[in-house]
Amino acid sequence: MCTPPVKNILGPLAPLATTVSAILAERLAVTLSRPSDQRRTFQSKCKCADCASVATFKASPTERQWTLKAAEHRRRHVESAVGGSDVDRETLRLGSPHALRLTKNTASSDRRVAEHARDRAAIAALSAF
Ligand SMILES: [Zn+2]
């Protein structure tokens, strides 16, 4: 049985594979770092008092949780403002009004680590051709 030369397997796609490998290698050259404290980024164009409190919370190197006991429209506004930015959101339904609790997480960092793992696997797969 005869195995075709490796380059022939990709044929006209070989330049594309080379380009993709270069892009992945460039992404892998970025050094990943885990958050060293509880500071997280937060960008909001809103200037209300609740968003200012969230900004202070997100900028704190030590605070991990923040709770807002407020009417639903304020809790929903804060939830909307924080978006998916490295916080878990939980509504505490004890008493009235309910409370929104934000807990910082490392989702962005975790996502970048997972992306690096996928990039390394993709480069390995491409280099097999
Ligand atoms: Zn606001």
Image (spheres, helix red, strand yellow):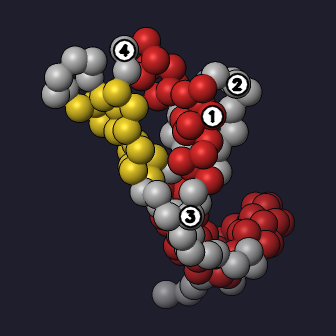
Residue 86, given in percent of the width and then of the height, sits at 50, 50
Q: Quadrant of residue 8?
A: bottom right
Distance Cα–Cα, label 4 vs label 2: 19 Å
Mark 4, residue position: 72
Callout 2: CB less than 8 Å from ligand 1: yes
Q: Amino acid at mark 1?
A: Ala
The residue sitting at the left extreme is 94
Closer to us: 12 or 98: 98
Circle 3 residues within 10 Å: few <14, some 14–19, many ≥20: few
Mark 1, residue position: 52
Q: Amino acid at mark 4?
A: Glu
Residue 50, given in percent of the width and then of the height, sits at 55, 28
Q: Amino acid at mark 3?
A: Pro
Residue in the picture at 69% in, 24% down: 46
Q: Measured along the vertical axis of the image, is residue 110 above or below residue 25?
A: above
Distance Cα–Cα, label 1 vs label 3: 16 Å
Q: Earlier in the sequence, mark 4 or mark 2?
A: 2
Q: Earlier in the sequence, mark 1 or mark 2?
A: 2
Residue 30 numbered tag: none
* Figure quadrant, ligand 1: top right
Q: Quadrant of the C terminus?
A: bottom right
Residue in the picture at 60% in, 46% down: 56
Residue in the picture at 78% in, 66% down: 23
Residue 29 visible in this rendered orientation of the protein:
yes
In the image, taking residue 99 as reference, residue 87 lies left or right, namely right
Distance Cα–Cα, label 1 vs label 2: 6 Å
Mark 2, residue position: 47
